[in-house]
Image (cartoon, rainbow, N blue to C red):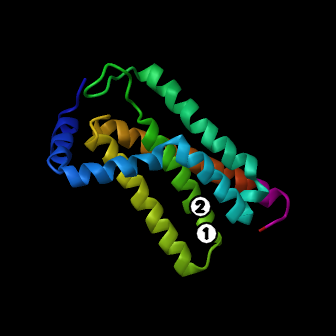
Amino acid sequence: GVLPVDAAVRDAVLTLAVPPVLGLMRLVNYAGDWRLLLPGTLVLVLVFDRARARWWVWGGLMLAAPLDESALKAVVGRVRPEDLSFGFPSGHATAAAAFFGALIYLAGSLPATACRAVRALAIVAIVLVATARVMLRAHWPSDVVGGVALGLALASAAALVARDQRSSTGAR
């Protein structure tokens, strides 16, 4: 069923859906699409030594995100607002939160100012992808909140695995 808060938040977001904003949201939507995130993950591995050292953790994260999201969709079985396909959790929100969550962790190796800037941009990207999915009428707000929570949980688990392995090898 639809939660009352879902309908209210969705209605509020849709009031902002004027043509220029919708055009921007269609572009933002790609930040949760595998066609951007797959090469983006390769860039993370190339740019960050910490990612390169544990490349399989970050690659595994980006494989686990859609697998877990699909499994949850089948278990929960909640339909989208304007479609009969399953919508909880949002795949775009899950993927974006997993990728940008990884970036938030990996940015810790950057100088302080760059770290803060990258982390802030990553958070903005997650929020914008989630908002785009609602504004483009693909999901209920709780679908994207669930997707963001799942993606960040997966990114956190990946960071713990990467950190634990670094600690067990004596690296700091």
User: Whole-percent x and y of residue 101?
Assistant: 53, 54
Question: Which residues are drawn in magenta?
Answer: 165-171
Tell me whether the residue at label 2 lies in contact with that at label 1, contact meaning CB atoms closer than 8 angstroms.
Answer: yes
Is 115 left, or right, of 123 in this rendering?
right
Report the residue at 23% width, 54% height from top: 20
Residue shown at 57%/59% (left/top)? 103
**Disc 2 from disc 1: Cα separation:** 6 Å
| Residue type pointed to by label 2 | Tyr
**Residue at disc 1, secondary structure:** helix
Secondary structure category for the residue under label 2: helix
* Residue 38 appears in the picture as rendered: yes
- 54 vs 78: above or below: below
Q: Is residue 170 magenta?
A: yes
Can you say which quadrant of the picture contains the C terminus?
bottom right
Q: Is residue 152 visible?
A: no
Residue 163 quadrant:
bottom right
The residue that label 1 is drawn on is 108
Q: Point out the residue furthest to the right here.
A: 169
For disc 2, the marked residue is 105
Which quadrant is home to the N terminus?
A: top left
Q: Is residue 147 left or right of residue 107?
A: left
Q: Position of residue 14 (x, y in %)?
A: 18, 44
